[in-house]
Amino acid sequence: MPRWAEGFWLVEQFRYPVGRRAWEFPQGSWGHEVRGGASALARQELAEETGLRAETVTHLGHPYEAYGFSTQGFDVYLASGLTEGEPDREATEQDMVHRSFTDAQIRAMVLAGEVVDAPSLAALTL
């Protein structure tokens, strides 16, 4: 969750399973062990998707996506002390855009159904 003084940075991309674009926090996973662990992965995904570099990355929690039938969970990190740079997106992320929003704008976007990603909504509660 890349935090700036008045809000957060979000990314928007087309999600094929639901057939629409929506705003969410930068996120991702790697199929192999990452040197430095999950916080290093958080930094890498942030830089890749937004070009932002974080001075500080703080672990906020580990929610489960559907613990009634799955063990899948995710780590939430707060990134602060941000420096802007160029994204280095994967081929499948070329339609992605990123921008900053104020807390009030994000609240309005959630209510308007523009942020529908469950992990992003859960992260906001942390």
Image (spheres, rainbow, N blue to C red):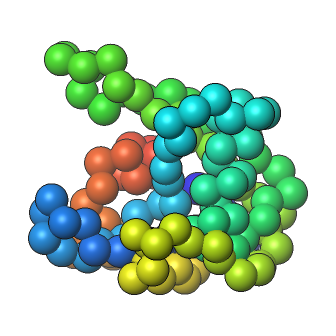
**x and y percent of residue 14 in the render?**
28, 74
In this rendering, does residue 6 appear at all?
A: no
At 50% from the left and 36% from the top, the residue drawn is: 31
Near-viewer residue (63 or 104): 63
Name the side, left or right, on which 97 lies relative to 68. right
At 65% from the left and 76% from the top, the residue drawn is: 87
Near-viewer residue (43 or 2): 43
Quarter of the image that includes the N terminus: bottom right
At 40% from the left and 64% from the top, the residue drawn is: 24
Residue 34, above or below 56: above
At 69% from the left and 54% from the top, the residue drawn is: 44
Q: Residue furthest right?
A: 55
In this rendering, does residue 54 appear at all?
A: yes
**x and y percent of residue 96 in the render?**
44, 78
Residue 5, above or below 35: below
**x and y percent of residue 28 in the render?**
49, 50
Q: Quarter of the image holding residue 95?
A: bottom left
Q: Quarter of the image holding residue 18?
A: bottom left
Name the side, left or right, on which 110 lies relative to 5. left
**x and y percent of residue 19 in the render?**
13, 70
Near-viewer residue (111 or 76): 76
